[in-house]
Image (cartoon, grey):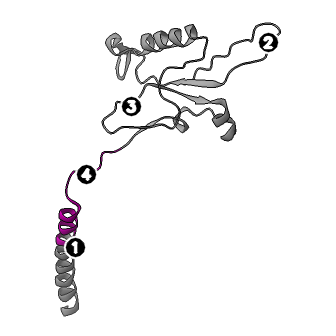
Amino acid sequence: TAVLVFRRPSEGSKPSVKKVWFYEIANDGYDPDKVVGGGRTETPEKNEIPDLMARWEKYRKSGFKAPPGPKAGALLEPGSEMPKCWWASVKSLAANDYNLAAGRYKPQVIEAAPEEDPVDLIREVLGIEKKITKGLETLLAEVESN
């Protein structure tokens, strides 16, 4: 489900929207996996709607100039928490034919580089490859002898 909110420009002014804000709700306060008596079990402690409303209020108070969250497509440091909200410039939406699919603009957390020494990794892969080759040679010999 997506919710779109539009503001009417004040009389005589031009629309001034330069940024579009996205917020991803994973939990609306009801457990999607537990249906009891025809309804879903309430999980108010997981409800993300109050956070959405608080961030929206902060954004509104900024005059819609400072949207919460990182810029669309940002690459976040390894170990960062995936953001609940982000924003995209109208220019970037125009470049994507005004596609409003939030996932298209969602920032991503960079994967941490492995801490192992590359030489050790290469040796480990070569060892695995040698075992595979030996197994295939054994299998080939068995198939050819039949």
Q: Residue at x 34, y 33 (%)?
A: 80
Q: Give the alpha-carbon distance from disc 4 to disc 2, as whole Å.
A: 54 Å
Label placed on residue 13: 2
The residue under label 4 is 114
Q: Distance from label 1 to label 3 (Cα)? A: 37 Å
Asked whether 126 falls inside the magenta stretch, the response is yes
Between residue 23 and residue 117, name the one nearer to us: 117
Residue toward you, 83 or 117: 117
- Please tell me which residue is depicted at 67% across the width and 16% down the height of the picture: 6
Looking at the rendered image, the disc whose residue lies closer to the viewer, 4 or 1, is 4
Mark 3 vs mark 4: in front: 4
Q: Split into 4 quadrants, where in the image is the C terminus?
A: bottom left
- Which of these two is toward me, 137 or 18? 18
Q: Residues within 10 Å of mark 4 (few under 14, many from 20)?
A: few
Tell me which corner region of the image, top left, top right, bottom left or bottom right, holds residue 39: top left
Q: Earlier in the sequence, mark 4 or mark 1?
A: 4
Q: Percent from the top left, x then y, of residue 63?
A: 61, 11
Residue 106 colored in magenta in the image: no
Q: Earlier in the sequence, mark 1 or mark 3?
A: 3
CB under 8 Å between callouts 3 and 4?
no
Instruction: Tell me the element at label 3.
Output: loop
Question: What's the magenta region?
Answer: 111-127
Residue at image mark 1 = 129
